[in-house]
Amino acid sequence: MIKITLPDNSVREFDQGITGLGIAEAISSRLAKEVLSISVNGEVRDLMRPIDSDASIKLHLWDDREGQETFWHSSAHIMAEAIEFFYPGTKFGIGPTVDNGFYYDIDLPEGKVLSDKDLAGIEQKVLELSRLKSDIVRSEISKADALELFTAKGDPYKIELITDLVDGTITLYRQGNFTDLCRGPHLPNTGFIKAVKLTNIAGAYWRGSEKNKMLTRVYGITFPKQKLLEEYLVLLEEAKKRDHRKIGKEMELFHFSPAVGMGLPLWLPKGATLRDNLEKFLKKVQKKFGYEQVITPHIGDVALYRTSGHLAKYGKDSFQPIHTPNEGEEYMLKPMNCPHHCEIYKFKPRSYKDLPVRMAEFGTVYRYEQSGELHGLTRVRSFTQDDAHIFCRPDQLKEEFLKVIDIIFIIFRALDFKDYAAQISLRDPNNKEKYIGSDENWEKAESAIIEACAEKGLKTVTELGEAAFYGPKLDFMIKDALGRKWQLGTIQVDYNLPERFGLEYIGSDDKRHRPVMIHRAPFGSMERFCAVLIEHTAGKFPLWLTPEQVVVLPISEKYNEYAQKVSNQLNISDIRAGIDDRNEKIGRKIRDNEMKRIPYLLIVGEKEFEQNTVAVRRQGEGDQGSMTIDEFTAFINNEVSEQLADAWK
RNA sequence: GCCAGUGUAGCUCAGGGGUAGAGCGCUUCCUUGGUAAGGAAGAGGUCAUGAGUUCAAUUCUCAUCACCGGCUCCA
């Protein structure tokens, strides 16, 4: 007998060799039907694998990430089997799970191409194979035998994978006639899969390297119930409705014109207002934190980027230098603002008493992103960074870092961003020569970041080797409507540029010292931030931010003049108001303006005109009764200042 | 840059070898109204661009461009 410890710490005894499924059956028959995999002493395993000694276990159901992964992993194998059925001779790469489902990278036989139209057939085959309830059987195999097997099968990618594996750890999984190299774990049989959707086809380089062959990647997702698939598809539809490109068009925020060029956004009046409001807000915050605004040109002498090192590192991937009519002059569109700011720092000698110098600029930069990478506003070729550079003494680094985190928190609160991830990127300690700067400085900077995050109670993940070559950094990531992660705010420590530009300050010892530079952008870029903000709010921006706060709706043409008067009066009080004087019934105007996501609608007719009032209607909440114009002005201004005060707290 | 897909009116889309349709939007007229779509008429398209096949191409083929989904990249 062996002792099995369950997650609630209760212990049950079983015969040696009991399987996960056996344990589930002993607990309840319903559990036995739903269980997908088991963790044995923390290792996720197949349900059918015997347990030989005392262990603590956890059974995984569909609700567990581990359970889903097992489910989707097996699904990938079944999809591979289905693909092999239609395309014999297909060579298989890897088939892992992802956040929402799984994929398999395949190399189709010569001349065969897979397109969306083929997916329905494969889906049907997957369901057919699932209904067979074929056992999924694990077997261990020696490296030599594995190599022989896949050589015979003609699977060069598998052979490459096996070559890298350690002998004695290699396992195969077989269901029906399909055998795959796999670590597992897997479902007991294929019958668990009741619904399948192959979502898309993409190209992907073998092992992620551009130098390798591009394989066909088929993405799919499966569920244990048809209803779950239907719910997932509804969710996908909902997410698509939040797509910033769609809302940007609907709300007339921005536009891309091929005549201007790809990846070059045109900000429409409402989008520009939105952006301007964000900029004003951040400028105000930054002013309180001791920042000074600067303005620098959009181009710079090539020599500037030679000095900064960017030309050597990124020159090939930038917009190419601009040649002037006179010989010998070459300018680059600026790919970043830092070199310009370094020159501002240098324009006069600095004392240790002057530091930190905090220089902010909404600086528009130009980067030649690869054409295939452009994506709405999240990845563009011209964008405006809410950039600032802090030049400080090494002993001020942590303090400055803390203050930047404060700024980011204020912004996230003002916009109700709660679901973000923070990542600390440090250097790879085993590969120090990749990085510039002394060990001492790196250690100081890294511990400053780690301590600052700890002091702020920030939940972080730490990635070794992810630091920039010039310093460690802290990034804030937010997910878009479809769950794709985007980096927004970033704080980076830099020892490189102060060195390259020979930046100095005179210390209290009357000697020259090198300042540390912090690059930071709480929004990241205005473009990307607006994109994520649109998806986060589905276009229903907070009142303080939204481009159109109020629309006045006259009941009939007779009251257009009064509506105009109300609108003018609100605008004088810094409320963004317009009127809808179309020749339509009031119901129609309400509907249209509700759909335009206007927070407040003011209905004015005979009654309001006579009493000098407005009938207030709040978005999604209907009629709120009437107020005088002054009351409404105070009401709106109060709501705005409350929203912002919450952020400052 | 690479792989696959898409490109028809301002927007969302239908259609299809014989040079085009709907809904919304827009213009004009009627209507002058009280909290989520009043009625009528009208304007608007080299069917992304270029070549090829054909008596005939918006439709088929190829190329180019843009967009979409990924891959690689992201100072």
Image (spheres, coloured by chain):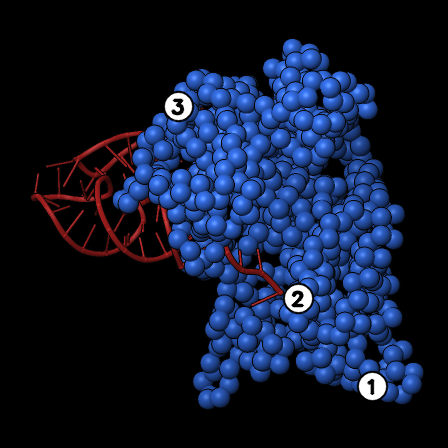
Query: Which of marks 2 and 3 precedes in the sequence?
Result: 3
Please, what secondary structure does the residue beneath circle 3 have? helix
Circle 1 residue? A512
Q: Which residue is drawn at 71% across and 45% down?
A: A420
Q: Which of marks 3 and 2 is in front?
A: 2
The spot of residue A494 in percent (x, y) is 72, 70
Quick check: do tags 3 and 2 share a chain?
yes
The spot of residue A70 in percent (x, y) is 58, 30
Q: What separation in Å lies between label 3 and label 1 (alpha carbons)?
A: 74 Å
Evaluate whether residue A151 shows in this view: yes
Asked if the residues shown at circle 2 and circle 1 are in contact, with their CB atoms under 8 angstroms apart, the answer is no
Q: A362 or A139, which lies in front?
A: A139
Circle 2 residue? A431
Left or right, A37 with respect to A323, comes to: right
Rendered position, A197 above or below A166: above
Name which residue type carries label 1. Answer: Arg
Name which residue type carries label 2. Answer: Asn
Q: Which residue is drawn at 51% across and 32% down?
A: A139
Q: Which chain carries label 3?
A: A
Please, what secondary structure does the residue beneath circle 1 have? strand
Q: Which residue is drawn at 46% across and 89% down?
A: A327
The spot of residue A510 in percent (x, y) is 89, 88
**Crowding at mark 2 (Cα within 10 Å: few <14, some 14-19, many 20+):** few
Circle 3 residue? A124
Name which residue type carries label 3. Answer: Gln
Q: Which chain carries label 2?
A: A
The chain in blue: A
Left or right, A339 with respect to B26, comes to: right
Q: A142 or B13, which lies in front?
A: A142
The chain in red: B
